[in-house]
Image (spheres, rainbow, N blue to C red):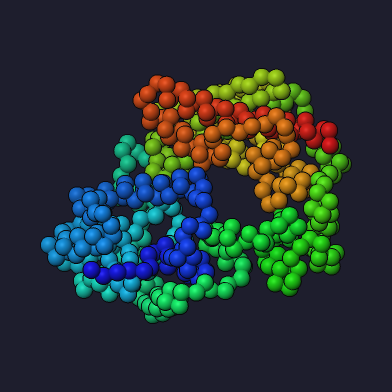
C-alpha cells in the first residue's frame, strides 16, 4: 500500500510558505485555534459539495465507510476496475501527493473529475487546487480527460425546487493544468526534499503570511513581533509600507520619525500608542453629534445569505434580512421573520413602521443596512419613497472611529462594533453569538428546529445579539458626548 506525504491542503501551504508547510506536517499542535467563523465556512463548503452530487446522482461514496484515506484509495481503485460510473471522494496518490476528487464520472469511456467550491468566483487558489488534482489524475488514470471547477451560478434564481444543473457552473482547467504540469512536479519534489531535510525553514515574516489566507501558524511566527510597541499595531499604514519599515529595521513605534510616516494621523497614532491615550478630535466629534436630529433610534439588521438559495426568487448568497432591532435610549423593539416563505414585503412594511416616527436612525457601518434596503426598493418599487426616507435618515457612527476622530490604541487594527464597545463601554456584554456569520447559523437552526423550546431559545439568542448591537451603537454616541 502506497504512502503519501502531501495533501491538497499541505501543498497550498507549501506554495504560500515553506515554513508553514513544515510546521503543518511535523508540528500540527502549533496551529492557531480554528475560529467558529472558519468552521462555519468549512461546513458551508461541505454542504455545497454534498448537494452538488445531485449533478451526477447515484454515485458511490468511497469515503463513507473507510477507516482511512489509504483504504479509500484502495476502494477507488476497485471501483475503477469495475467501471463504476460515478464515484464520490475518489482518492488517488501520485508522487506522494494525495487528492480526493469530489466527483469522478466515467463518461463515454473516459473519466472527468469535478471539484466543487462554495463560491461564485474562481480564485487563484481554487485554480491551483484544481490543477494539482489534474496533475495527480493525469498520472494515475490512463483514460482521464479533464477536471472541471464547479462553482455557484450568480445568475441563478430559485423557482420552485432547486435545479442543480442551473445552480452550478462548470469550468475546465485542462488548459491551465497542462501548461503547469512541470511546475507542479518541481514544486512537489521540492516539498519532499524539504521534509527529508527535517529542518524548519528559516523564513521571515512577510506579506505571504496573509495571502491567500492568514497562516494557521501566525501566532507561532509572530509571537515576538506583535508587542504593545510594534509598528504592526498601526492601522493606517498598509502592509507594503509596514514591511518596508520592518525590513529596514524599524520595528517599534519609538523608532518611527515624522519622515517615515505618511501623514499627520500616523504621528498622532504613534503618540497614542506610546502614551496609551486615545486620539480625540473634538471638533469632528461635535460636528457628528450636531448631525443627529432628535428623536433618534439605533437600528441593526441581521442578514441571512445562503450559498444554496432557499427562498423563492432569490440567488446564491443573496442577502435577505430576517431580524431588525431598535433602541431609542429607553426601549428595545424588534421584529423577526422565520421566512418559511418569502416574507420580505412584510419586513419592508415593518421597517417603515418602526422608523417613521424618528428623525435620525443610528447604525454602525451602514453598508449592509443600505444594501438591504436598496434590495427591498428593487423588490417593492411601490414602497420606494418610504424606504428611501429610511436611508436618508441613517447616520453612520462607524466613520467617527474609522477616520480616527476617536481612536484608542487598544483597538489596534480592529474597528468592529464589538471591539470598540468592549474597550470603550462598560455596560455592553455580548453573549453566545459573536458575529454575523454565527447569527446566520443560529437562524438556520431556528428555521429548521422542530423543538419548540430549542426554537425559542435560538430566537431569543438572535434577538439578544441584535439588541446588543443597537445598545452599543446608541451608547457609543453618548460616549462621544463625554470625551
Query: Residue 406 appears at what percent x and percent y?
Result: 79, 43
Q: Is residue 355 visible?
A: no
Residue 196, compared with residue 130, is above or below; it is: below
User: In the current view of this chain or complex, which residue is farthest to the right?
Assistant: 283
Residue at image position (43%, 42%) is: 306
Residue 186 image-quadrant placement: bottom left
Viewer-proximal residue among 295 and 114: 114
Name the side, left or right, on which 395 lies relative to 188. right
Residue at image position (56%, 38%) is: 434
Query: Residue 221 appears at what percent x and percent y?
Result: 59, 63
Residue at image position (70%, 59%) is: 232
Residue 260 image-quadrant placement: bottom right
Name the side, left or right, on which 421 lies relative to 182. right
Q: Quadrant of the N terminus?
A: bottom left
Query: Residue 274 appears at what percent x and percent y?
Result: 82, 54
Residue 226, compared with residue 469, is above or below; it is: below
Q: Is residue 340 visible?
A: yes
Viewer-proximal residue among 313 and 53: 53
Amino acid at each position: 500500500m502506497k504512502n503519501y506525504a502531501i495533501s491538497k491542503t499541505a501543498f497550498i501551504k507549501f506554495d504560500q510558505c515553506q515554513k508553514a508547510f513544515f510546521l503543518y506536517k511535523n508540528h500540527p499542535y502549533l496551529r492557531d485555534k480554528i475560529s467558529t467563523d472558519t468552521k462555519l465556512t468549512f461546513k458551508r463548503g461541505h454542504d455545497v459539495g454534498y448537494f452538488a452530487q445531485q449533478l451526477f446522482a447515484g454515485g458511490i461514496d468511497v469515503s463513507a465507510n473507510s477507516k482511512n484515506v489509504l483504504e479509500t484509495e484502495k476502494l477507488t481503485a476497485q471501483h475503477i476496475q469495475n467501471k463504476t460510473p460515478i464515484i464520490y471522494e475518489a482518492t488517488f496518490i501520485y508522487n506522494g501527493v494525495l487528492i480526493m476528487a469530489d466527483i469522478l464520472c466515467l463518461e463515454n469511456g473516459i473519466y472527468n473529475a469535478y471539484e466543487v467550491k462554495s463560491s461564485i468566483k474562481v480564485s487563484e487558489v481554487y485554480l491551483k487546487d484544481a490543477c494539482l488534482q489534474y496533475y495527480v489524475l493525469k498520472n494515475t488514470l490512463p483514460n482521464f480527460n479533464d477536471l472541471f471547477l464547479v462553482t455557484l451560478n450568480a445568475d441563478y434564481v430559485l423557482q420552485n425546487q432547486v435545479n442543480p444543473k442551473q445552480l452550478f457552473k462548470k469550468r475546465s482547467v485542462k488548459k491551465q493544468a497542462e501548461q503547469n504540469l512541470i511546475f507542479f512536479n518541481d514544486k512537489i519534489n521540492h516539498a519532499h526534499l524539504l521534509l527529508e531535510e527535517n529542518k524548519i525553514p528559516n523564513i521571515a515574516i512577510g506579506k505571504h503570511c496573509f495571502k491567500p489566507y492568514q497562516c494557521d501558524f501566525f501566532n507561532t511566527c509572530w509571537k515576538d513581533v506583535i508587542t504593545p510597541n510594534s509598528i504592526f499595531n498601526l492601522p493606517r499604514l498598509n502592509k507594503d509600507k509596514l514591511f518596508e519599515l520592518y525590513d529596514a529595521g524599524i520595528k517599534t513605534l519609538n523608532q518611527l520619525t515624522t519622515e517615515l510616516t505618511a501623514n499627520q494621523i500616523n504621528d498622532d497614532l504613534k503618540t497614542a500608542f506610546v502614551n496609551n491615550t486615545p486620539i480625540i478630535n473634538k471638533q469632528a466629534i461635535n460636528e457628528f453629534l450636531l448631525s443627529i436630529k432628535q428623536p433618534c433610534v439605533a437600528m441593526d439588521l441581521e442578514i441571512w445569505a445562503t450559498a444554496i438559495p432557499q427562498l423563492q426568487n432569490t440567488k446564491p448568497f443573496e442577502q435577505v434580512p430576517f431580524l431588525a432591532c431598535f433602541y431609542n435610549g429607553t426601549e428595545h423593539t424588534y421584529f423577526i421573520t422565520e421566512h418559511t416563505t418569502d416574507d420580505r414585503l412584510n419586513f419592508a412594511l415593518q421597517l417603515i413602521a418602526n422608523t417613521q416616527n424618528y428623525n435620525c436612525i443610528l447604525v454602525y457601518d451602514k453598508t449592509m443596512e443600505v444594501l438591504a434596503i436598496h434590495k427591498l426598493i428593487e423588490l417593492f418599487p411601490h414602497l420606494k419613497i418610504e424606504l428611501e426616507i429610511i436611508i436618508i435618515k441613517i447616520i453612520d457612527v462607524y466613520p467617527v472611529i474609522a477616520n480616527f476622530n476617536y481612536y484608542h490604541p487598544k483597538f489596534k487594527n480592529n474597528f468592529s462594533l464589538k471591539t470598540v464597545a468592549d474597550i470603550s463601554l462598560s455596560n455592553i456584554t455580548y453573549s453566545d453569538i459573536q458575529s454575523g456569520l454565527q447569527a446566520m447559523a443560529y437562524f438556520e437552526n431556528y428555521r429548521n428546529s422542530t423543538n419548540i423550546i430549542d426554537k425559542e431559545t435560538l430566537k431569543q439568542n438572535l434577538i439578544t445579539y441584535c439588541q446588543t448591537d443597537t445598545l452599543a451603537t446608541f451608547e457609543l454616541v453618548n460616549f462621544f458626548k463625554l470625551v
